[in-house]
Structure formats: C-alpha cells, structure tokens
Image (tube, rainbow, N blue to C red):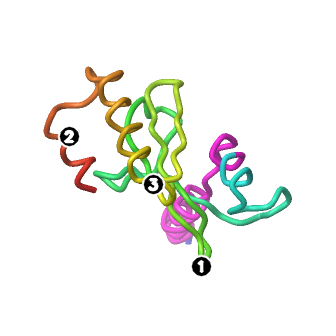
C-alpha cells in the first residue's frame, strides 16, 4: 500500500509542477502590454514571451534573444522584445516595418558577439 501511494505521488507531483510552470510573470512585459492597451491594469489576463527561433519561453536566466510577446486573447497583436543582458527593447512591429527593421539591425550591430550571422538571418526571416 505504501509503495502504491509513493508511486501515485510520484506521478502526480510532476504534473502539478508542469501546471505551475506554465504561469508566466514578467513585470516589464506586463507594463509594456498595459502601456499599449493590450491589457488593463487589474487584468488577470495571461501573456507570453516565446523565443523566435527555438519557441522556448523566456526565463529569468536568458541573456540574449528576440522574443514574440503578447496576450492570450483574440484580436490582439504580437510584439517583439529584443533582449541583451539587462537591456530590453520593446517593438510594435505593426505600425512601421522600416522602424522595426532598423531597430533590429541596430540591435544586432550593438550586440554582435551574441549572435552568429546564421542566427541573424534566421531572426530576420522569422
């Protein structure tokens, strides 16, 4: 009986951890989404940040990359987060494509040691 309970707990605990791991909280992203009207101040709405090339969720240990950010709601846009160490640049890529590309190229130039040429081309393609 004890073995059965132990096995049952081992099966339940990883599922519980995965459910809690899906909760995503980043105050800077939340503040940005509120500032552009995608969320309201008291909203309990979920939002996301996925790396463009690998589709991994943004973690606090990540130091560089370009992420898609937005809310899990219909009729909303996806935005970009350019991340290099503590430097974060948020882009509204739906209003001015020229300015978006200019910002991305400037980001690559400023942080060239973080990305290979192949990665840069892959990011631009995405």
Residue 119 got which mark? 2
Residue 108 occupies which quadrant of the picture?
Answer: top left
Residue depicted at 40% across the width and 53% down the height: 97
Residue depicted at 71% across the width and 66% down the height: 45
Q: Reading the chain from its start, which is encountered first: label 3 or label 2?
A: 3
In the image, 106 versus 55, the foreground residue is 106
Q: Give the range drawn in magenta.
A: 2-31
Q: Mark 3 points at which residue?
A: 68
Q: Where does residue 46 sit, x and y in percent of width and height?
A: 65, 64
Tell me whether the residue at label 2 lies in contact with that at label 1, contact meaning CB atoms closer than 8 angstroms.
no
User: Is 4 situated left or right of 36 in this image?
Assistant: left
Q: Secondary structure under badge 3? A: strand
Q: Distance between the residues labelled 1 and 3?
A: 16 Å
Give the dominant element type of the magenta stretch: helix, strand or loop. helix
Q: Mark 1 points at which residue?
A: 74
Q: Distance between the residues labelled 2 and 1?
A: 31 Å
Q: Secondary structure under badge 1? A: loop
Residue 63 occupies which quadrant of the picture?
Answer: top left
Q: Give the vertical position of 69 relative to 71 (above or below).
A: above
Q: Reading the chain from its start, which is encountered first: label 1 or label 3?
A: 3
User: Is 45 situated left or right of 83 in this image?
Assistant: right
Mark 1 closeness class: few <14, some 14–19, many ≥20 residues within 10 Å: few
Tell me whether the residue at label 1 lies in contact with that at label 3, contact meaning CB atoms closer than 8 angstroms.
no
In the image, 9 versus 80, the foreground residue is 80
Q: How far apart are marks 3 and 2 (CA)?
A: 16 Å
Q: Specify the quadrant that holds the C terminus.
A: bottom left
Q: Where does residue 107 sit, x and y in percent of width and height?
A: 38, 30
Q: Does the magenta stretch include residue 32?
A: no
Q: Where does residue 2 sit, x and y in percent of width and height?
A: 56, 66
Q: Specify the quadrant that holds the N terminus.
A: bottom right
Q: Secondary structure under badge 2? A: helix
Residue 26 got which mark? none
């Amino acid at each position: 009986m004890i073995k059965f309970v132990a096995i049952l707990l081992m099966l339940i605990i990883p599922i519980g951890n995965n459910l809690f791991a899906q909760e995503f909280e980043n105050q800077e992203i939340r503040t940005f989404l509120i500032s552009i009207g995608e969320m309201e101040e008291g909203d309990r709405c979920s939002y996301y940040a996925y790396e463009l090339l690998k589709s991994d969720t943004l973690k606090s240990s990540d130091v560089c990359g370009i992420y898609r950010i937005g809310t899990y709601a219909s009729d909303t846009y996806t935005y970009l987060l350019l991340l290099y160490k503590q430097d974060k640049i948020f882009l509204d890529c739906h209003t001015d494509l020229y300015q978006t590309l200019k910002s991305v190229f400037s980001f690559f130039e400023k942080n060239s040691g973080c990305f290979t040429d192949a990665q840069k081309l892959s990011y631009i393609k995405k």
